[in-house]
Amino acid sequence: MAKVLAPIIVLLMIFAVVDIAVIERDRIRGLPRGLWLALAIVLPVVGPVLWFFVGRLRKGEGMAPSAAASAPRRAGPIAPDDDPEFLGRLRREQEQEKRIRELERKLNESRDDKPGD
């Protein structure tokens, strides 16, 4: 039995240590990275289990707005349909065009209604 459990425990420990070492800082919960590494090494079964169930946040889970805002952004241009500023400006321009057409229609109607022209 020990011959079967020992390699599983070692693999779990290695996987946890590598995961702790490479995960983004804002996805680490509870303790600093160094303490999680120490726990995973010193407590071969308990440390990695605690890491995976307590210390590690899944992508997008529980991230504070400030952490989400400070997340690295892609370099380069943003596609127009992904750019909120562009979409807002486009919406405002469409609303303005609609108002202009409505005012032009009302102006034409008022010209047509005047007698004696």
Image: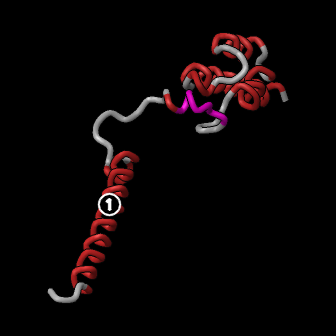
Determine whether 84 is above or below 58 in the image. Answer: below
Residue kind at label 1, given as amino acid type: Gln
Determine whether 14 is above or below 112 in the image. Answer: above
Coloration of the structure image: secondary structure
Q: Position of residue 107 (x, y in %)?
A: 26, 75
52, 116: nearer the viewer: 116
Q: Residue at x 28, y 77 (%)?
A: 105
Give the left or right position of residue 99, taking residue 25 as reference. Answer: left
Q: Quadrant of the N terminus?
A: top right
Q: Which residue is mark 1?
A: 96
Quick one: label 1, few (<14), some, or many (20+) residues within 10 Å? few
Q: Quadrant of the C terminus?
A: bottom left
Q: Residue furthest right?
A: 1
Give the left or right position of residue 80, taking residue 111 as reference. Answer: right
Q: How many marks?
A: 1
Q: Position of residue 101 (x, y in %)?
A: 28, 71
Indicate yes or no whether the magenta region holds residue 66. Answer: yes
Q: Residue furthest left?
A: 117
Q: Residue at x 36, y 62 (%)?
A: 95
Q: Quadrant of residue 40?
A: top right
Question: Magenta segment range?
Answer: 62-68
Q: Position of residue 96 (x, y in %)?
A: 32, 60
Indicate yes or no whether the magenta region holds residue 27. Answer: no
38, 93: nearer the viewer: 93
Determine whether 13 is above or below 41 in the image. Answer: below
Q: Residue furthest bottom?
A: 116
Q: Position of residue 36 (x, y in %)?
A: 69, 16
Determine whether 95 is above or below 58 in the image. Answer: below
Q: Residue at x 50, y 31 (%)?
A: 69
Q: Residue at x 58, y 32 (%)?
A: 65
